[in-house]
């Protein structure tokens, strides 16, 4: 089958999109991927057998994407771009990554008689509720959440298949009237072929907590810094390493300074996958401190399975999917989202070995791995 994936950002990198596209290529499908570029990258490219077609995106159009439901010329831009790819390449199925461009997929589905798959990486309306740009007056006017909620309910009815990343997301959509049988769970599990851990362990002079990922307010890293100040000397040599980048980086640095934690908090910046594995190997425990919201209660971060594969105790907030998997696997401890006091107490309990945490690599090898999820994706297309 000739499949056109549609991605509303640069590619590469995107671990989930790469894993899905390669799974379909390896199953014998011809996979095209349409995305934009703001970095003057080649308009036609080939990445590991994925045929990439890029379109340059101006700053004006990039900013207009926020208001796509209010001013739909952003959709028109994508419709013209995708129409040509479909007609030139005999595309048979559209695979839209995330909610925003699903409307364009719907239009082209009926124009060309295509199959339409909508792949929801996130609970998009819930994400907008906690995003900084939609919490401003202008953001609420240009991209009101209620319009996105209505858009999601109406547009998904036209999909031949819906993909979500976790069972809780399927439950949410089914409760809102979507056909449960038409929703497949393809999770953000670990592709072990592309994640190699170095042969080293934690620094004996420190007790290292590690976080890797985006740095925004709703990631909950401010709770970790507050908890670190409450732990004090109860954990000798404790330090926090934060890997990644984002809009909340400077406020976190300021908070660490105000708490006199300058020597205990290290910001590594953006890392390569190899560097992520290296820092993870040096950690004593790994963090997912996300604030509990409708968004984090219906998604699952890729990093969880990296942490589990590395046999690191996972310290996570009580978001529903995190709590379910960590409880099932006994791979870590759960604290109340946003509570620095509860997190500090749980950190000390973990350090003093007053809680039972088991190595979790076997769970990744036997259940939570990309090979299993790739099989779900390939089966969906076979049907």
Image (tube, rainbow, N blue to C red):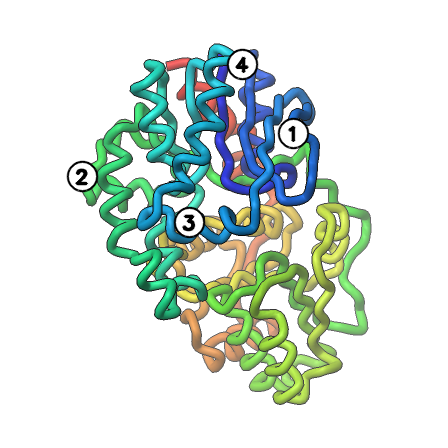
Q: Position of residue 332 (x, y in %)?
A: 53, 59
Q: Closer to us: mark 1 or mark 2? A: 1
Q: Position of residue 128 (x, y in %)?
A: 38, 57
Q: Position of residue 40 (x, y in %)?
A: 69, 40
Task: Judge from the rendering whether residue 296 lies leftward or rightward of residue 301; answer left or right.
Answer: left
- Residue 356 visible in the displayed image: no
Reading the chain from its start, which is encountered first: label 1 or label 2?
1
Residue designated by label 3: 299
Kind of element beneath mark 2? loop
Reading the chain from its start, which is encountered first: label 4 or label 3?
4
Identify the mark at residue 29; answer none if there is no mark. Answer: 4
Task: Judge from the rendering whether residue 150 lies leftward or rightward of residue 22; answer left or right.
Answer: left
- Quadrant of the rendered image containing residue 381: top left
Q: Quadrant of the C terminus?
A: top left
Q: What's the residue at 67%, 61% (across, down)?
A: 243
Mark 2–mark 4 contact, CB under 8 Å? no
Q: Position of residue 75 (x, y in %)?
A: 39, 38
Residue designated by label 1: 43
Kind of element beneath mark 1? loop
Question: Mark 1: few, some, or many residues within 10 Å (few <14, many ≥20)?
Answer: some
Identify the mark at residue 177; answer none if there is no mark. Answer: 2
Q: What's the residue at 80%, 73% (across, down)?
A: 205
Q: What's the residue at 43%, 66% (across, down)?
A: 291
Identify the mark at residue 147; answer none if there is no mark. Answer: none
Task: State the separation of the CA atoms marked 2 and 3.
Answer: 19 Å
Reading the chain from its start, which is encountered first: label 4 or label 1?
4
Reading the chain from its start, which is encountered first: label 2 or label 3?
2
Task: State the separation of the CA atoms marked 1 and 2.
Answer: 40 Å
Task: State the separation of the CA atoms marked 1 and 3.
Answer: 32 Å
Question: Mark 2: few, some, or many residues within 10 Å (few <14, many ≥20)?
Answer: few
């Amino acid at each position: 089958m000739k499949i056109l994936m549609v991605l509303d950002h640069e590619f590469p990198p995107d671990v989930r999109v790469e894993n899905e596209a390669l799974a379909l290529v390896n199953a014998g499908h011809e996979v095209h991927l349409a995305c934009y570029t703001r970095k003057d990258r080649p308009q036609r490219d080939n990445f590991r057998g994925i045929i990439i077609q890029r379109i340059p995106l101006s700053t004006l159009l990039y900013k207009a994407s926020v208001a796509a439901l209010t001013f739909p010329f952003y959709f028109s831009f994508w419709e013209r771009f995708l129409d040509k790819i479909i007609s030139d390449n005999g595309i048979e199925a559209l695979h839209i990554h995330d909610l925003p461009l699903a409307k364009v997929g719907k239009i082209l589905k009926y124009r060309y008689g295509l199959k339409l798959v909508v792949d929801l990486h996130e609970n998009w309306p819930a994400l907008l509720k906690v995003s900084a740009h939609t919490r401003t007056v202008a953001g609420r006017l240009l991209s009101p959440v209620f319009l996105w909620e209505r858009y999601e309910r109406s547009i998904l009815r036209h999909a031949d298949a819906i993909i979500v990343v976790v069972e809780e997301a399927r439950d949410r959509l089914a409760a809102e009237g979507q056909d449960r049988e038409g929703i497949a769970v393809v999770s953000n599990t670990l592709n072990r072929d592309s994640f190699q851990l170095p042969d080293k362990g934690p620094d004996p002079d420190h007790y290292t907590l590690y976080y890797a990922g985006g740095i925004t307010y709703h990631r909950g890293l401010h709770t970790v810094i507050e908890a670190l100040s409450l732990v004090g000397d109860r954990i000798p040599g404790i330090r926090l390493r934060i890997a990644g980048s984002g809009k909340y980086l400077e406020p976190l640095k300021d908070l660490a300074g105000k708490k006199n934690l300058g020597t205990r908090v290290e910001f590594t910046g953006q890392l390569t996958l190899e560097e992520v594995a290296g820092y993870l190997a040096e950690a004593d425990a790994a963090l997912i401190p996300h604030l509990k919201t409708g968004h984090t209660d219906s998604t699952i971060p890729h990093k969880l399975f990296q942490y589990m594969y590395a046999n690191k105790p996972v310290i996570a907030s009580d978001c529903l999917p995190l709590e379910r998997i960590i409880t099932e696997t006994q791979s870590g401890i759960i604290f109340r989202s946003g509570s620095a006091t509860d997190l500090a107490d749980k950190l000390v309990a973990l350090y003093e070995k007053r809680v039972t945490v088991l190595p979790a690599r076997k769970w990744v090898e036997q259940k939570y791995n990309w090979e299993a999820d790739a099989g779900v994706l390939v089966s969906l297309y076979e049907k």
